[in-house]
Image (spheres, grey):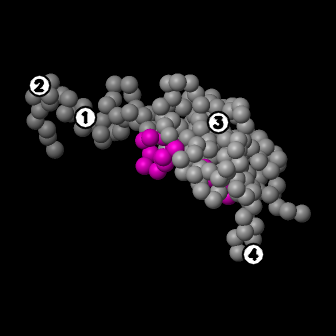
Amino acid sequence: MTFAFSGRSGLVAVLCSLLVLNGCASYYTHYAMFPAETSAGETRQVRVSWQSAEYPGWWLASNKATPIRLETQCSERVWRITDQNHSDSGTCGEGVRACGEPGKDRIAATGQPATGKDVCVVVEQGATLQGVADIGSSFGLLVSCRPESVVVKRGDDEVNMDYLRPSLVAYTVHARKVPRGTLSARLPSFNDNECKED
């Protein structure tokens, strides 16, 4: 197959074709695991994780990232922390945050039921933070809600829905950033044996 290009526009077309074929982005997995208390006062492991695609500074595309998953050991509650670039970002304001879910959350400061317009979890990292793709290796995680019920009934079973205890001071999170697809990109696992009742 031959290509007939001339001049500067031809060179640009060839370069663009090669870049599209070879890909420009570098792909990463970001994660952290740390111990913290839940709203019920139990010490559990908490895991945050997300994926990102980073482009060279000269490339036209902006860096992108998935929502952040916030998970708590022994609990089925998974928070999706989003920004304005995500289709399911909710209506509770701007920034990197997770909105409350009616029937699942209460605002810790007032005890009132949380709605989809209430911010329950927010990522803090200075005034320049625009989205998940901008988050660095260290950031704050501020939790301002608590679960409506720590345990819910599902058939004959009781299911734990607890999560990080709300705090006036943000939790400090130190995340690792590793190339996606490598062995070191595997997320640390929870020890489920600690969740079993005696």
Identify the residue shown where x is 80% and y is 50%. 40
Mark earlier in primary sequence (3, 2): 2
Tags 3 and 1 touching, CB below 8 Å: no
Give the residue pinned by disc 4: 156
Residue plotted at (67% across, 58% down): 76
Disc number lying in front (3 or 1): 3
Q: Which label sits on residue 7?
A: 2
Disc 1, SS: helix
- Residue 82: image x %, image y %? 51, 43
What type is the residue that disc 1 sits on?
A: Cys
- Badge 2 crowding class, 10 Å Cα cut-off, few under 14, some 14 to 19, many 20 or more, is few
Classify mark 4: helix, strand or loop. loop
Q: Is residue 75 magenta?
A: no
Residue that extends furthest to the right in the rendered view of this protein: 198
Tell me which numbered mark, 3 or 4, is placed earlier along the sequence: 3
Residue type at mark 2 is: Gly
71 horizontally vs 6: left or right: right
Q: Work out whether mark 4 precedes mark 1 in sequence or the reverse, and give the earlier one.
A: 1
* Marking on residue 141: 3
